[in-house]
Amino acid sequence: MSDLYDTDTYTWAKQQADALRRRSANEVDWDNVAEEIESVGKSQASELRSRYAILLLHLLKWRYQPERRSRSWEATIRVQRKSILDHLEENPGLRARRDELLGRAYFEARQGASGETDLPVETFPETNPFTLAEAMDESFWPDAPTAK
């Protein structure tokens, strides 16, 4: 069974699903099934982190390039907020990890904002300037930073 897992994951998955449905415990590749189930959970967390990164990237662009704000940026922010809510509704167990995943997403968002705006990465704060509540608040649109 493990050989098939390594050479043809698709066929292995179909066979394992069939064995589970038939409750045929002796045909189940338990270690690899457990690993695959864990990876499903990890991918759901990764998707949430990725959506947060896209949202934060666009909030940073909105704040730091106000002269380039566009309906496209606005749409991306709105879509990500809605998609995040939908994802959390489908995966309520991730609610406890929202702050952690938002924090992890910020590094990626900061790098992406620098690349997309041609502004030096140092332009953007080292730590996330947006709270989870702000990022997810559909009425929150960050103002441009004030000169120091």
Image (cartoon, grey):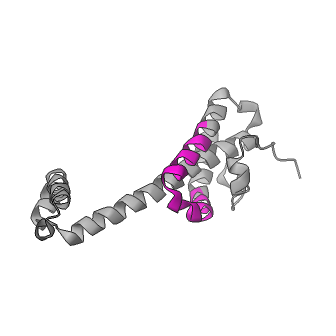
Note whether residue 92 is visible.
yes
Residue at position x 62%, y 53% from top?
Answer: 110
Q: Position of residue 139 (x, y in %)?
A: 76, 40
Q: Position of residue 48 (x, y in %)?
A: 52, 53
Outermost residue on the front side: it is: 22
Q: How many marks?
A: 0
Q: Position of residue 37 (x, y in %)?
A: 32, 63
Whether the magenta-drawn stretch holds residue 46 is answered as no
* In this rendering, position of residue 28 left or right of residue 109: left
Q: Position of residue 35 (x, y in %)?
A: 29, 67
Residue at position x 69%, y 46% from top?
Answer: 60
Depicted 61 relative to depicted 34: above or below: above
Note whether residue 119 is visible.
no
Q: Which residues are magenta?
A: 79-105
Residue at position x 41%, y 61% from top?
Answer: 41
* The N terminus - image quarter: bottom left
* In this rendering, position of residue 83 left or right of residue 74: left
Depicted 142 relative to depicted 28: above or below: above
Viewer-side residue, 72 vs 14: 14
Q: Quadrant of residue 118?
A: top right
Viewer-side residue, 142 vs 30: 30
Q: Quadrant of residue 40?
A: bottom left
Whether the magenta-drawn stretch holds residue 80 is answered as yes
Depicted 38 relative to depicted 146: above or below: below
Residue at position x 71%, y 31% from top?
Answer: 68
Viewer-side residue, 12 vs 20: 20
